[in-house]
Image (cartoon, helix red, strand yellow):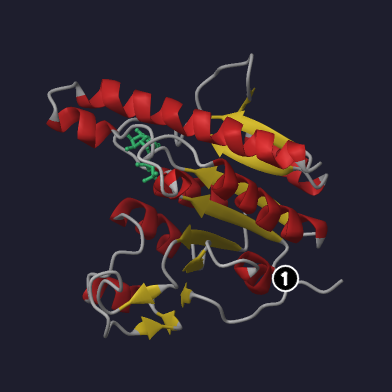
Amino acid sequence: MGKKYNRVLLKLSGEALLGEQGHGIDADILSTYAQEIKAVQEAGVEVSVVIGGGNIFRGVKGATQGMDRVQGDYMGMLATMINSMALQDALEQIEVQTRLMSAIRMEAIAEPYIRRRAVRHLEKGRVVIFGAGTGNPYFTTDTAGSLRAIEIEADVILKGTRVDGIFDSDPEKNKEAKKFDQITGDEVLKRRLSVMDLTAFTLCRENETPIIVFNMNKKGNLKRIVVDGEPVGTTVI
Ligand code: UDP
């Protein structure tokens, strides 16, 4: 079966898992995400995933309340492990083979991240979830996503959001906001558009990894992009 991309990295935000809830993980959203991932994996695409932890804990937030920033960041990294384990479970419930690899060693629940092993898992058709961010404080899971995408030589990094792509202003605040179908990295910087934090964005640019920002909450979008090659979302080239 034809497909647009062979190997992708999907970045999901932790916050998206909240759904209508004030805290925690919405089971319906989780299972929808698992279904979307399964659809592309079944089409023969090698899929890796990085999921954030913002629904549980953010180091910056802890720091504003007086917590040591580094301590908070490690808590944030552990939060990503909770979301990663939840996603792993949701995928396994629908018979998708997965491996969870952690940037911080915790052998009882995840393999340590080793690039060559990650690539091998992907080649065998397993969905690989990268947990615990980069393993370092002062970074974000967007940066972890960019880093892993480059390391495993993913064709593209897909940033799943709750909006349709990159707009010239915030579409959740401005009804007139215009969406870009394609935009260059220079233009993103010039217009100060928020695609990812600058560390994550710069890593992608320097290594020529394209970024596609799209709405993960619209059923079938992931497959439309990855398998059918439809121009969904915004591509940063
Ligand atoms: N974090 C970190 N290093 C990393 C990735 C994440 O210290 O490489 C911490 C950081 O405190 C961050 C939290 O984990 O706030 C949760 O990740 P993030 O905010 O990226 O989650 P998202 O916004 O995608 O839900």
- Please determine whether, in this image, residue 193 is positioned above or below residue 85: below
Q: Quadrant of residue 56?
A: top left
Query: Residue 50: image x %, image y %?
Result: 53, 44
Residue 59's x, y, as percent?
27, 32
| One can see residue 117 in this view | no
Quadrant of image for the N terminus: bottom right
Residue drawn where x is 38% and y is 82% of the image: 179
Residue under the image location 38 percent in, 53 percent down: 200
Instruction: From the top left corner, tell me how far across and down residue 66 is, in percent.
Output: 12, 23
Image location of residue 118, percent across then percent down: 68, 39
In depth, the one of 64 and 187 nearer the eye is: 64
Find ligand 1 in the image and state its quadrant: top left
Residue sticking out furthest to the top = 108
- Above or below, 17 against 206 in this view is above
Number of numbered labels in the structure image: 1
Looking at the image, residue 137 sits to the left or right of residue 35; the answer is: left
- The outermost residue toward the right is 1
Q: Residue furthest front?
A: 20
Q: Give me the residue at 67% from left, 33% from top.
A: 89
Circle 1 is placed at which residue position?
227
Amino acid type, residue under disc 1 in the picture: Val
Q: Which residue sits at x=45%, y=82%?
A: 182
